[in-house]
């Protein structure tokens, strides 16, 4: 029977610790929201907000038509609201949350997804440019996360932000009734 020495146990612990550290580093690379585990836990266990900040600086609710469900190309229905503003107008986070994706897609062009309270994902599309945040960063309502543009399938249209809210259980929900009357 072989006995483990104290230095052997220490070496085993160091290897185990190194493996845990490696798994954590890979996890935060693949799932950047894990960089803030306590904040993430609070977001996913809290209730979804009944009101959100209007996500374009200087725009009032009365200026935003409720275009939810309107016909779009390819037989699609509009799954958000379009908020028109001058190109380069700051797009601000509608809630606190964690940036879970910055990137591009065919319809939205330059987009940002923010995981907010109640596990809702806030989708900001047609951006002209991104703000100073990257995937995994914490944002608060009112933080500038991008700038109004017309990228993606909005090329050739007046600059605007397409804003959508998605829930895991219901899918896309109409954000217009949730838009607050003021900004922080």
Image (cartoon, rainbow, N blue to C red):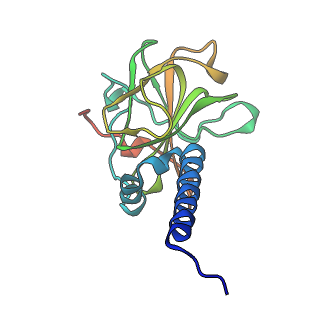
Question: What's the residue at 72%, 30% (across, down)?
Answer: 73
Question: Where residue 98 appears, x then y in whole percent?
Answer: 43, 43
Q: Quadrant of the C terminus?
A: top left
Quadrant in the rendering for residue 125 = top right
Q: Nearer the viewer, residue 157 or 92?
A: 92
Question: What's the residue at 44%, 31% (across, down)?
Answer: 65
Position of 20 with respect to 73 (left or right) is left
Quadrant in the rendering for residue 102 = top right
Quadrant in the rendering for residue 126 = top right
Question: Where residue 78 appears, x then y in whole percent?
Answer: 60, 37
Question: What's the residue at 66%, 23% (across, down)?
Answer: 153
Which residue is at the far right? 74
Question: Where residue 180 appears, x then y in whole percent?
Answer: 30, 40
Q: Nearer the viewer, residue 149 or 25?
A: 25
Q: Nearer the viewer, residue 63 or 43?
A: 43
Q: Quadrant of the N terminus?
A: bottom right
Question: What's the residue at 32%, 47% (across, down)?
Answer: 51
Position of 26 with respect to 176 (left or right) is right
Position of 21 with respect to 147 (left or right) is right
Position of 78 with respect to 81 (left or right) is right
How many labels sit on residues? 0
Question: Where residue 168 appears, x then y in whole percent?
Answer: 56, 57
Tell me if residue 157 comes above or below residue 7 in the rendering. above
Tell me if residue 82 comes above or below residue 149 in the rendering. below
């Amino acid at each position: 029977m072989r006995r483990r020495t104290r230095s052997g146990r220490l070496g085993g612990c160091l290897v185990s610790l190194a493996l845990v550290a490696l798994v954590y580093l890979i996890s935060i690379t693949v799932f950047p929201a894990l960089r803030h585990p306590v904040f993430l836990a609070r977001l996913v266990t809290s209730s979804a907000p009944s009101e959100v900040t209007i996500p374009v600086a200087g725009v009032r609710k009365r200026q935003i038509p409720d275009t939810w469900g309107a016909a779009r190309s390819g037989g699609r229905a509009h799954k958000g609201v379009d908020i028109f503003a001058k190109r380069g107008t700051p797009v601000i986070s509608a809630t606190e949350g964690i940036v879970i994706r910055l990137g591009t897609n065919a319809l939205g062009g330059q987009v940002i997804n923010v995981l907010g309270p109640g596990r809702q994902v806030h989708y900001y599309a047609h951006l002209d440019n991104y703000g100073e945040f990257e995937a995994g960063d914490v944002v608060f309502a009112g933080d500038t996360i991008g700038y109004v543009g017309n990228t993606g399938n909005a090329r050739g249209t007046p600059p605007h932000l397409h804003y959508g809210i998605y829930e895991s259980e219901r899918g896309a929900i109409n954000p217009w009734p949730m838009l607050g009357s003021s900004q922080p």
